[in-house]
Amino acid sequence: MPCTGEETLESIQNNYNDVSHLRVTYNIYIAVHVLARALEDLKTCNKEEGPFILGRCANVWTFKAWQLLHYMKKVKVKLSSGRELYFDRNGNPPAVYDIINWKLGTNGTVMHVSVGTYDTSTFFGQVFNINTSAIVWGIEDQQVPVSVCSQTCPPGFRKAPKRGEPVCCFQCVPCPQGEISNQTDSIGCIKCPWDQWPNPQKSQCLPKPLEYLAYEDPMGSAIMAGSITSSLVPACILRLFIQHKYTPIVKANNYTLSCILLVSLSLCFLCAFAFVGYPQPVMCLLRQTMFGMVFALCISCILSKTIMVVCAFMATKPGSNLRKWTMPPVSYIIICICSLLQFLLCITWLSLVPPFPELNIVSQPRLITVECNEGSSTAFWCMLGYLGLLATISFIVAFLARRLPDSFNEAKFITFSMLAFLSVWVSYIPASLSAQGKYTVAMEIFAILSSSWAIIICMFLPKCFIIVFRPDMNSRERVLRKER
């Protein structure tokens, strides 16, 4: 067919216009142009303005190689393709490459198709050009093949070499607990500061949240509400006892000791306030000692009531000299002595190794637990053990006196109350050792409230029932009636 003059060789693919084998020819073509331009510049040198010593010029017929090289370094040639050829200070020409894609033709021949260029002589941003849609890959899915044997490790991971494989082959290992990596392909992880913890992606360190039993916490609010409500129960019982203090059942159960016991039980419920909220230095000093002293007063009253019950029964036997031990001052002395021993133990504790607030980052690494360090765990368990000793003595004495006549059946109620009290605090020991953070404090508060309720229910609920609902049983004849 006749030519129109608008045809281009780039659109024709055959063996006659395949220029992939003309690299040497093209290089010779460029070299001839460079030499020709250098010779031209050497020939047109003006005398006394030459580049050599004393402004001399080289003779075009007898020049030296180094003289021609001087002109070659300064050559700038514009080629027929429109590109400009020159040399940098190292003697290197611009890097100009055609990016060739080998394609298999329909007739089974291999075609070399230009899909892009790399030219450092062009403007910035146009050095590398490639038409990715024109590339035909030699794999079935026509996806870009991966040129590495391992994928890039994202932040939160570190590179670990694979044994027996090249250095470029590695596996991505998650950073250990408490460490991060904030870069791609990191070779190591960074440990977070003591007051920070990694985010779920382990790419950055975030401040650790503070944990303590706060007033705003649902558990803290429930404890506060339960403590206030529970403290009103002993107060209501106390008012009921005051109104019926001349009735036989109130007199028979030692009205004065019952009042002291009810006041101490109300304070036991209110002790929970000292355990809720941000641990302040003053509260850390007082909360355990406050709990120990109030409960020591409570158990001392019960122990005194138990001893009074036994002495009163023994004093009724002929020839007994125990009547003087049933006098009210004796019960007050027992209470004072038992409470004084607990007071001395608490004073020694606060003087030698006082409790103090601390930030605990060991029990729960993700959190900073703000808690009270008891100073001496031995002192704390001694204080708690002393309460257990008083309760055990009361239980044993009351248990032995449980079969006394009905007029002295207070021993039965004391037996049940002390049994419940001891059960609660024995259960508290393993529970407190297994709990962490604010739940340790919640366990102690639960033990305080539960043991106080056990005493209220076992000792005062039957009496309140008789006073309110069975007034016919609240008579001298029924109280003094012997058990058959």
Image (cartoon, helix red, strand yellow):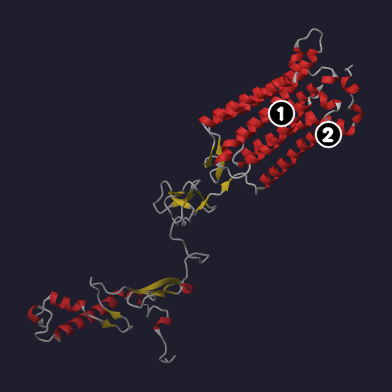
Q: Residues within 10 Å of mark 2 (few under 14, many from 20)?
A: few
Side (left or right) of 81 relative to 482: left
Q: Pointer 1: what residue?
A: 421
Side (left or right) of 207 relative to 406: left
Tell me the element at label 2. helix
Disc 2 residue type (three-letter): Gln
Percent of width and height locating residue 65: 13, 75
**Which residue does the image show at 13% across and 74% down from the upper left?**
66
**Label number found at residue 243:** 2
**Which residue does the image show at 66% across and 28% down from the upper left?**
296
Percent of width and height locating residue 97: 35, 73
Percent of width and height locating residue 234: 76, 35
Tell me the element at label 1. helix
Quadrant of the snapshot with the C terminus:
top right
Near-viewer residue (189 or 71): 189
Q: Mark 2 and mark 1: span between their CA atoms?
A: 28 Å
Q: Quick check: 57 above or below 223?
A: below
Q: Quick check: 44 above or below 24?
A: below
